[in-house]
Image (cartoon, grey):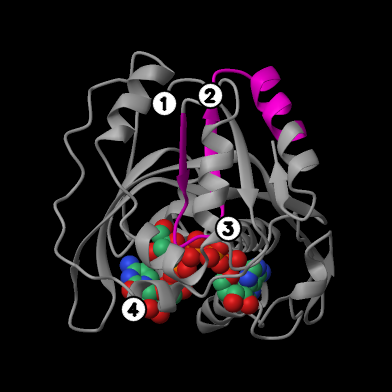
């Protein structure tokens, strides 16, 4: 089969439905026990053949981001190009475009999702032949969230993010995401933790019967990064309260290290109604459904 001349990969927002900090390794990284899921929307990475690597940014959050070598898209592309070159092939290039729809440094893994989408896109464009385990190992070196973003489906995730156990499925729900517009640096939030030896997640049922079952189970869990994040950005608590008060919202919680808060709704009509009301009340917040 000839190599494709244009590859596009979605980079959906990652949600930490539950996040327990269970320890700290000698290198400073924290061991975590998490339930993660993915939104049906997010960024998008496209790749076309070219002599060298380059990156163009589009989308409503492009302005806040550098298109230089520090961008996780170019870091992922560079790491994969090195791997291809190490096998004796010429170092490949690509013209990459990142459509940045997710707010930056917002706890929904945008950079990690972009890195994962880039690895997948270029693995195909370059016919590089890396398997899922190779890609996950390469991805982990770019960010702890990249392996779960490569999997791209609901999972229990542990270690520092490298152990990804896909779940049979989650009940159907519709999502609303709210971000109060303040970027949060993940290391600052981990630094603010009072305790690092919390219990792991409670046992997962073989299957969740419905959204109310999932919401009850989530009620027994935590996001341990919530308190330090609220210490840095008090508006997270306001976003949680505003979402939880929307008609139909079954559960609301901060994702990752913040400041984005997700709300779970039974259907798209309830979610759209909540998003509309939130946009009117908080015109400066980012609201997605
Ligand atoms: C908070 C989460 O988003 C939950 O999914 C992730 O653990 C963070 O994932 P990420 O942004 O891809 O993380 P990285 O870029 O690897 O690390 C950013 C910083 O977060 C802290 N960090 C991250 C992951 C982890 N398991 N322990 C940590 O302590 C470290 O200070 C690290 O320097
Ligand atoms: N393509 C990218 N998208 C977003 N951030 C990027 C990208 N490339 C580099 N970065 C840098 O990575 C940092 C983290 O951004 P990101 O949006 O991934 O954070 P996050 O959503 O809090 O991630 P997580 O949930 O994994 O902690 C930012 O400081 C940003 O400058």
The mark closer to the camera, 2 or 3, is 2
- Nearer to the camera, 240 or 162: 240
- In the figure, is residue 104 to the left or right of 97? left
- In the figure, is residue 68 to the left or right of 208? right
Residue 98 in the image, given as x and y percentages of width and height: 77, 63
- Nearer to the camera, 197 or 45: 197
Q: Earlier in the sequence, mark 4 or mark 3?
A: 3
Label 1 belongs to which residue?
A: 170
Asked if the magenta segment contains residue 224, the reply would be no
Residue 84 in the image, given as x and y percentages of width and height: 56, 75
**Does the beta carbon at disc 3 come under 8 Å from ligand 2?**
yes
Residue at point 55%, 31% (across, down)? 245
Locate residue 155: give its quadrant: top left
The mark closer to the camera, 2 or 4, is 4
* Element carrying mark 4: helix
Q: Gap in Å between the C-alphas at discs 4 and 3?
A: 24 Å
Residue at point 62%, 57% (across, down)? 117
Residue 123 in the image, given as x and y percentages of width and height: 60, 60
Q: Which residues are magenta?
A: 251-276
Locate residue 108: give its quadrant: bottom right
* Element carrying mark 2: loop
- In the figure, is residue 232 to the left or right of 167? right
Residue 108 visible in rendering: no
Label 2 belongs to which residue?
A: 173
Q: Gap in Å between the C-alphas at discs 3 and 1?
A: 20 Å
Is there CB contact under 8 Å for labels 1 and 2? Answer: yes
Q: Earlier in the sequence, mark 2 or mark 3?
A: 3
**Residue 5: which disc?**
none
Label 3 belongs to which residue?
A: 113
The mark closer to the camera, 1 or 4, is 4
Label 4 belongs to which residue?
A: 191
């Amino acid at each position: 089969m000839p190599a494709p001349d244009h590859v596009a990969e979605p980079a959906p927002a990652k949600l930490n439905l539950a996040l327990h900090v269970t320890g700290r390794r000698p290198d400073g990284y924290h061991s975590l026990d998490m339930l993660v899921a993915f939104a049906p929307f997010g960024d998008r990475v496209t790749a076309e053949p070219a002599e060298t690597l380059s990156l163009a940014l589009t989308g409503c959050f492009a302005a806040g981001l550098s298109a230089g070598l520090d961008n996780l898209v170019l870091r992922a592309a560079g790491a994969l190009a090195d791997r291809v070159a190490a096998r004796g092939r010429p170092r490949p290039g690509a013209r990459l475009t990142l459509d940045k729809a997710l707010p930056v440094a917002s706890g929904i893994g945008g950079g990690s999702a972009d890195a994962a989408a880039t690895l997948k896109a270029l693995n195909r464009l370059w016919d590089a032949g890396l398997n899922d385990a190779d890609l996950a190992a390469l991805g982990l070196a770019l960010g702890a969230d990249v392996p779960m973003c490569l999997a791209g489906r609901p999972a229990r995730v542990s270690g520092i993010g490298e152990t990804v156990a896909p779940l049979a499925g989650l009940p159907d729900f519709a999502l609303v995401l709210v971000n109060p517009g303040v970027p949060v640096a993940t290391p600052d939030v981990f630094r603010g933790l009072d305790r690092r030896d919390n219990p792991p997640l409670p046992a997962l049922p073989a299957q969740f019967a419905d959204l109310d079952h999932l919401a009850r189970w989530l009620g027994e869990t935590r996001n341990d990064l919530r308190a330090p994040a609220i210490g840095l950005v008090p508006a997270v608590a306001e976003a949680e309260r505003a979402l939880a008060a929307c008609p139909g919202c079954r559960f609301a919680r901060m994702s990752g290290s913040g400041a984005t808060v997700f709300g779970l709704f039974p259907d798209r009509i309830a979610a759209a109604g909540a998003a509309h009301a939130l946009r009117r009340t908080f015109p400066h917040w980012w609201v997605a459904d």
